[in-house]
Image (tube, rainbow, N blue to C red):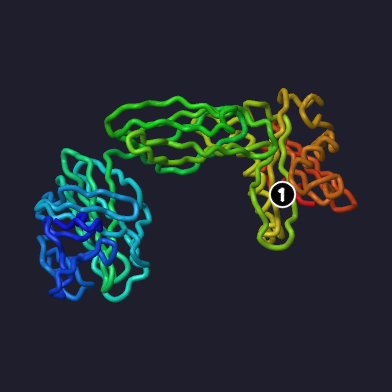
């Protein structure tokens, strides 16, 4: 056992098996513990120690075990160093950051396993000098094998025991001059969120988040979202797939809002995260990629609160579907189809109290003689102002498309000499070529 003991002169010196280590000069000089520490290496499956700056090496004990046999009595992480005690009583200490040589694990931390599961832990070696050897040692029924891709990259294939017991794998890396050590900790259980982002329309409603888990977990909603987002869910021990139901209040704001919800593995304290996104009044349907962006704003009239809220199991509300279809029909016509990448398209959710077009809807739309539709164009512009970049100075350079929630055959487009335009048409007319021609300024 390598250690340190105080001599009668009050100084501390290195020892092995309780006996002083001498410098080999034949003069009886002990090796001062404040000087060069003994160094260790692994060669041909055996531990070797050098007391003279790697000039000579002494064989200690085997460094490998069979089928996960425990050859470590203990491994203690001291921060900058790790103390390792072998089963034969040999004790040594390795510096974790004694040089620029290092090993990195992209997912380093506490790894989660199920009983009998095999997983690969990817590693990368940095700042090595000369050839590099990577060794992985497991105990308590765990198995660890190193698969080397090249001098700097590879993976450690780890298999957990069944039944499961907590464990760790000690990873040793050494090149021509240095040795470093890292410990990988393993705990039982998984909390997996296969989908990272969930979206819903601005209306109040519920959204289901899928979670696969075999441990107890908790849900962490950030404080700034607690006023509009609430949760209730299940907690069982067997591996299962849960649907966590979140209730979102109606978003009365113009902008979209989001919350990063934490799904916390209670056993390991590890967080998975999902983002719940809720649209506001304004929704961006398309962004230009060429030019400065010509703006189109799609709105609806005669759409009630229910029409602006997605039904259970639906991702889009009735209005959202009509707005999306309106955009596609508009760009089905040339020359807009060829120049589609020059347009910014937005939808603005406008709520009406009813669907009767007698002047009582949000835009006061009325059907007149023939296919004529009248309405309050000033009110239309006021809602267009909710889109970022549109004001009373620029609204006349914007095309407003107003969908009427009606099956009546009609449609009217207003055009102004300064280039602006506003088209009012029932949604049922979208499939007609006349809509595409009549709504295009």
x, y (%) of residue 381?
A: 82, 40
x, y (%) of residue 353?
A: 72, 23
Q: Residue at x 83, y 32 (%)?
A: 368
Q: Residue at x 37, y 32 (%)?
A: 217
**Position of 429 compared to 104: left or right?**
right
**Position of 231 compared to 169: left or right?**
right
186 and 281: which one is in front?
Answer: 186
**Quadrant assignment, res 6:** bottom left
336 and 430: which one is in front?
Answer: 336
Q: Is residue 172 at all visible to an observer of this figure?
A: yes
Above or below residue 382? Residue 229 is above
Above or below residue 244? Residue 429 is below
Q: Residue at x 71, y 23 (%)?
A: 354
**Position of 174 compared to 232: left or right?**
left
**Position of 346 compared to 209: left or right?**
right
**Quadrant assignment, res 318:** top right
x, y (%) of residue 272?
A: 42, 41
365 and 368: which one is in front?
Answer: 365
Q: Residue under circle 1? A: 436
Quick one: label 1, few (<14), some, or many (20+) residues within 10 Å? Answer: many
262 and 19: which one is in front?
Answer: 19
């Amino acid at each position: 056992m390598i250690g340190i003991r105080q001599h009668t002169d009050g100084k501390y010196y290195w020892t092995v098996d309780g006996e002083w280590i001498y410098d080999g000069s034949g003069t009886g000089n002990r090796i001062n513990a404040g000087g060069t520490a003994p160094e260790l290496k692994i060669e041909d499956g055996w531990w070797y120690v050098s007391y003279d700056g790697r000039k000579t090496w002494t064989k200690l004990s085997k460094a490998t075990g069979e089928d996960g046999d425990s050859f470590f009595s203990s491994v203690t992480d001291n921060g900058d160093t790790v103390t390792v005690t072998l089963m034969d009583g040999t004790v040594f200490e390795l510096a974790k950051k004694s040089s620029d040589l290092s090993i990195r694990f992209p997912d380093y931390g506490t790894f989660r396993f199920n009983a009998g599961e095999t997983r690969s832990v990817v590693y990368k070696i940095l700042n090595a000098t000369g050839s590099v050897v990577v060794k992985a040692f497991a105990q308590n029924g765990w198995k660890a094998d190193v698969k080397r891709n090249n001098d700097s990259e590879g993976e450690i294939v780890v298999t957990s025991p069944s039944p499961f017991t907590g464990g760790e794998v000690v990873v040793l890396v050494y090149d021509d001059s240095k040795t470093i050590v890292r410990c990988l900790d393993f705990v039982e259980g998984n909390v997996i969120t296969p989908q990272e982002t969930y979206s819903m329309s601005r209306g109040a409603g519920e959204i289901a988040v899928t979670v696969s888990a075999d441990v107890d977990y908790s849900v962490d909603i950030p404080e700034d979202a607690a006023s509009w987002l609430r949760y209730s869910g299940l907690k069982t021990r067997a591996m299962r797939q849960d649907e966590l139901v979140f209730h979102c209040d109606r978003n009365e704001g113009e902008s979209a809002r989001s919350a990063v919800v934490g799904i916390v593995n209670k056993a390991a304290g590890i967080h998975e995260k999902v983002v719940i996104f809720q649209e506001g009044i304004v929704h961006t349907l398309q962004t230009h990629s060429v030019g400065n962006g010509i703006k189109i704003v799609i709105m609806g009239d005669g759409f009630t609160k229910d029409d602006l809220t997605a039904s259970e199991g639906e991702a889009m509300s009735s209005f959202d579907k009509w707005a999306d279809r309106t955009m596609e029909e508009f760009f089905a016509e040339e020359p807009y189809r060829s120049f589609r990448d020059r347009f910014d398209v937005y939808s603005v959710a406008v709520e009406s109290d009813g669907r009767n077009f007698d002047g009582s809807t949000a835009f006061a739309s009325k059907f007149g003689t023939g296919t004529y539709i009248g309405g309050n164009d000033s009110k239309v512009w006021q809602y267009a102002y909710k889109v970022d970049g549109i004001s009373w100075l620029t609204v006349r350079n914007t095309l407003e498309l107003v969908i009427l929630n009606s099956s009546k055959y009609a449609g009217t487009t207003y055009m102004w000499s300064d280039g602006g335009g506003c088209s009012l048409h029932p949604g049922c007319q979208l499939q007609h070529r006349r809509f595409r021609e009549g709504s295009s300024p």
